[in-house]
Every structure is written in C-alpha cells, then in structure tokens.
Amino acid sequence: MNFDTIAVIDWSGASSPSPAKPSKDAIWIGTARDGTVGASYHRTRHDATEALAALFEAEIAAGRRVLAGFDFPFAYPAGFARAVCGTEDPLALWTAMAARIEDGPDNANNRWQAAAELNGLFPGIGPFWGCPASVDDPRLPAKGTARQGHGQAERRGCEQRLKSTQPCWKLYTTGSVGSQALLGIARLQALRQRFGSDLAVRPFETHDAPVTLVELFPSLIARTVAELAQPGEIKDRAQVRILAGALARLGPGRLDAMSREGDQEEGWILGLGHEAEIGAAARGAFAAPELMPPRLRDDCFAMPQGVAWVPVEEALSRLRAALHPVTGTETLPVAQAAGRVLAEDVAARRSNPPMPNSAVDGYGFAHAATGTGVQRLPLLAGRAAAGQPWPFPVPPGHAIRILTGAILPDGVDTVVLEEDTATDGATVVFDGPAKPFANTRRAGEDVAAGAPALAAGQRLRAPELALAPALGIAELRVRRRLRVGVLSTGDEIVASPADPAEPHQIWDANRPMLLALAAGWHCEPVDLGHVRDDPGRIAARLDEGARAADVILTSGGASAGDEDHVSALLRAKGTLSSWRIALKPGRPLALAMWQGVPVFGLPGNPVAALVCALVFARPALSLMAGAGWCEPQGFMVPAAFSKRKKPGRREYLRARMDSEGRAEVFGSEGSGRISGLSWADGLVELPDGAADVGPGTPVRYIPYASFGLG
C-alpha cells in the first residue's frame, strides 16, 4: 500500500495554551502531498486534534491515504498493559488510559492524578515519576530515583536501541515524553472512535485503512534536519517539515513496509534501522533547488538572422519564451506576505466555515418539527452567539435565540429571521412553512478542509491574506522578491536635482521613475546610481548590479550611435541583441546577458522609457518573479481626438478619460515631454496598421492601473 499524504506531528504535554506567536515546545504539524511540504502551528491539543480530524476527513473524501506519525510512545514496556487492563493488547490499554484522562480545550488536564492512580496499581513506588512541587501525592514521586519495587522495565526494546530517547515514565521537566504519551494516547483513542475502521494503528493493527497512525521520533535524522533547516527556523518546525518531506519521498511501498515492523505489544518507532535511507530521502527532497534558482541562457534574447523590425506582439512572444522564474523561496507568516508570489499550492487546513452556523439574527429550530400556518415554539432560556456556542441539544419542537455567526446547536437546522417573528420571551411565533435550512451556512460551503485554496504563482493581495488565516493557514511558502537593479548612464545626466546642472545637462528622471515602477510591481528595487559615459565605470557598475540584482534596467545608450556606450559594452563583453521594435515611442530596446543576469536597455527619453517599461519590462519581470506573464487589460472607448496614422508600427499615446467617458490625448507626442506622463492616467493603443481616428471613433484605452502603475 502507498500513502498519498504524510503528516508528522510534534506533540506537547503543556497544561496551558502555547504562545500566540509560533514557538518551540508546542505542537507543530508537518504535511507533505504531491511534492508540496508545509508546517502549521497549534496552541492546544484540542486545536491540533480537530485540525488532524479535518485533514483525515478531507483526504478520505478525496480517496487519498494518509500516514500520520506522532512523536510520543504508542505503548509501554511489556507487562504494563496486562497489569493495567488484564490483557497484552496495547489498544485495550489505550481505551483504559483514555478513560482516566481529562484534557480540556485549553490544555488543562489531570495527568498527575491519572499517573498517581496508575502507579497505585503496582507494588512499591512508580513506575511514573515527575511532578511540580504543588502535587502532593505519595503515589507519584517527584524524582525517578525515589522509585522502587514497581516491577516495570525502564525502556521498551526500540528505546534501548535509541539512547537519545527519554523513558516513557518521565512526566515533568525537559523531555517529559511520559506526559505527551498519557495525553496523546487519549487524543488518539478519540480519533479511533471517531473514524472507526477507516483508521489503523501500526504495528498493532495490520489491516489497510485510509488513515494509518504510527509512532515517530523526529530526532532519528537530527543531523540531516540540522543541515536542511532554514536559517532561524524553529527546530520543532524544521523537524516535522523535513521528516514529512523525507517520508513522502520514499519509494513505493517502503513506508507501508516500515510501518509493519516492530513488537506487537511494545510498539515501534517508524524508520528505526533505516536512518540512512530516510536521511537520503530528506536530502533529495530539500537539498536546495531553491538555493540556486535557474539562470537564463546566455543567448536567450538572440533574434534570428535577417530580422529587422520586430512587431510588438512578436517581441512580446519572444520575450515570454526566453524567460522563466529565477527567484528562490522562503516561508513567511501570513501578515508579512503581502505582495509576494505564492511558491506552492495551498490547501485549506480546516473548512470555512468550520461548523454549520447562522447567517442571521433570529431563532433556530429543527425544521421537521414545524409545518404550515402559524408556528408557536417554546423558547429555551439562553442563546447561541458567535464565539459563545449553546452546549446542549435543542429538543424537537423547541427554538433557541441565535445570532449571526453562531454555531448551530444540535437539533437546529433552520433559522427564521428575527424580523419575521414575534416573541414574549417564552415563545416565538412565525408564519410557516419555513424553508428547510433557511438562513444557515453549511460547514465548508466556502472552502472545505483539504480543498485547494490558493494557487502557486498567485500574487498575495489583501483578499488572499484574509482567506489564508480563515482557513487556518499561518505561514505561506512564497518566492523571494525579484531584485531589480536600475542604472542610468550618460554625460548629459546629473544624478540628483540637489546637484547643479549646466545648460547642456539634465537631471535624472528615468532612474526615480524606474525604481518606483519596480517597487510598485512588488519587486525589490536596487539603485545602481548614475554612471558617466566611461566604459570601464559602466562595466564595473554592471558587475555590481549582477551581484546585487536578478535583472538590470538601464536607460540611455541603448541605440547604435557613437555615444551609445551601454550597447557597445554589452556587445563587447556580454551578449547583446538589439531589438528594433515597430513601436512609437521607444523603438530601440537592447536585451542582453551580463554575467548571467538579464539587462533591459531602455530608451533614454523618459516617455519612451516608461512606455517600453510598461509594455515589455512589466510582464517580463512578473514572469521572472514567478507570478506568470501578465498582460494589461484595456477597453474600447470613444476618442475625443483626431489622428491619422500610417501603417508599420504600433503607437501608444498619453491619454486620460474626460468627463464624458472619452479618451483625450496629450497635446504633444514628443518623447521628451515628461509632463504628459503626469497629465495622463493611461495610454491609448493604436494598432500596427493604418488608422484614421476622429471624435467618437472607438479606440483601445489602457489605464495606468492595468500596467500595475498605481
């Protein structure tokens, strides 16, 4: 049998909820499926158990098989089960242990009392030990050295082979795996009762089931985890994430075979004796494709011989074919992921809504107990509200006050709107018949647990950052921001208006514009400054850019004139393809590779530089960032201008919408008229062929916002 989904659970025996901020010594669940690995943080055992139950239900419904491994003992040394429940069957012991354990939703529990009662079944003192000073019960010693005469072995057979494990009797302080086992077995027994024959516990049960539970010891591959953990990653998170990925990578049937190994009474640690195999699988799963993102080919921009003027659509098509994502990945909390590109598909950790609930303020009841005509239902003394569920069943023929968002109590499947009722506080009256399930929301009607929620390549906006936490997702695997270097060149350019400019010089307008564009496109702008027309200095600055950025944008010097030093340098020391694009404004576009980093040589005139950046750089950078190729969305509007255009090249006119919904254009088409960029709120695109535009002629208008220019 093969497994489709792997879950690795680092458990906790805490007596109160773990901190809200993800931390160590709490519950972490690592999951792996279809090549995607993730980890989630849980503050309480109740929350973790419900999350696992939701995962199991979703995977069973989808026909997938799950292996879930927990890092606490599933059994005790031989003889313990018979002493407690009269049989060597460890699952009978689970039932007996669960009956003694009380474990609340807030982690409050009775483990000290339960352990003391279990000790009372044995002669002498022990075997369980360890408790805070506030526990005053002679049956439970505070120190292991105080035990004597209880007759139980200190370790199971599998633990004798792994000296780094803690004994299952230890309940307190560092490594108190005994508390994890007492409280964990009780939770697993509840899952057994919930899922019945759909769940098997290995190696005690041999039948194939949709869900298989096994005992794990994440430190089995501790050195490998240390090698592959992300910088600053919480150790517990790294362990579950890496071990889940490793187990998922094992060959067909290997996990099933490993899960059947071990003693039928004492149990077994999955993978014991196979450490090298699991470690190799972990390195295969995580050894660093993300650390070295693929580079572009040195000749990726080369044009076929004989190509002179390139139509815009052909240029875009060639550019799209030449590029691919070049950014690595990292994991971020949802709150820090705004603007990032999702690196992997994300499934819902739990359903939204998680339980059936009321869509309105009103009164809830069982529809089957109502009929036609005036309905009079006695009201229960209480109410159900969001965050304050009614804990008891509502008897048939009765109603309860219920508020918007409240979980439907047992016995309630329909809600009548408050405005459609009358009540004296003891009885509610409304006209029947009520529609079955009226004014209620089904569990998972938005998104079901385990269902796809967010897709890889998606840019994370505010709506996605609302959906993720609603589905129980605390962290997201995202792509690193694309680093965009911006370099200006030219003797005629002065870097900043803070510096004086001679009459023959101009202040740098392109570099601030392009840096702002990169930031607005959710890239990381890298300011490479301004360099005079000196090939050596330009080469040194390009070297710096190749080290600091994933892609470089230059402006000026991209043609073939005497002072076009950028093109000459890229031709001499890099790989250059000069694209002469049938476009106005912005005909020259230099595309090159410099030390493995792509360089976009934009025109020097600001209007042409902006148009080329919007039309070519924006979709290219989006693709390289992992967000896919993006095309601007335009729409047809009446023209408020006249223009006769010759065939041969596409034209973009600075434009804005007037009060009558028509596109008006800037008074001059000069590439140096920077004020027209600010005057406009978009571009009118005129096709490659001839055009004769007059007032009222439909033209394609593309707002700046469609280019990602806010």
Image (cartoon, rainbow, N blue to C red):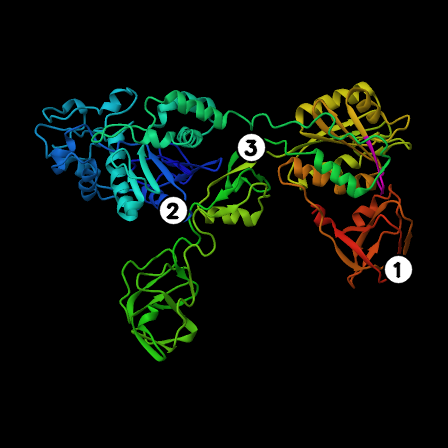
**Which of pointers 1 and 3 lies earlier in the amino acid sequence?**
3
In the depicted view, which residue is nearer to us: 341 or 162?
162
Spatial CA distance of label 1 from label 3 is: 51 Å
Question: Which residue is tagged 3?
Answer: 329
How many discs mark residues in the rendered view? 3
In the image, is residue 115 part of the stretch drawn in magenta? no
Spatial CA distance of label 1 from label 2 is: 64 Å
**Which of pointers 3 and 2 lies earlier in the amino acid sequence?**
2
The residue at the point 32 percent across, 61 percent down is 409
Q: Is residue 568 left or right of residue 93?
A: right
The residue at the point 37 percent across, 31 percent down is 255
Q: Please report contact status of discs 1 and 2: CB closer than 8 Å, yes or no.
A: no
Toward which corner of the image does residue 278 lie, by quadrant? Answer: top left
Above or below — where is 192 with respect to 133? below
Residue 60 - label: 2
Q: Position of residue 292 (x, y in %)?
A: 59, 25
Spatial CA distance of label 3 from label 2 is: 31 Å
Label 2: element kind? helix
The amino acid type of the residue labelled 3 equals: Thr
Look at the magenta stretch and give its main secondary structure.
Answer: strand
Question: Which residue is tagged 1?
Answer: 694
The answer to whether one can see residue 29 in this image is no
The amino acid type of the residue labelled 1 equals: Gly
Furthest-left residue in view? 123
In the image, is residue 585 part of the stretch drawn in magenta? yes
In the depicted view, which residue is nearer to us: 403 or 72?
72
Q: Is residue 527 left or right of residue 434?
A: right
Above or below — where is 542 with respect to 377? above
The residue at the point 91 percent across, 25 percent down is 562
Q: Which residues are magenta?
A: 578-587
Label 1: element kind? loop
Q: Please report contact status of discs 1 and 3: CB closer than 8 Å, yes or no.
A: no
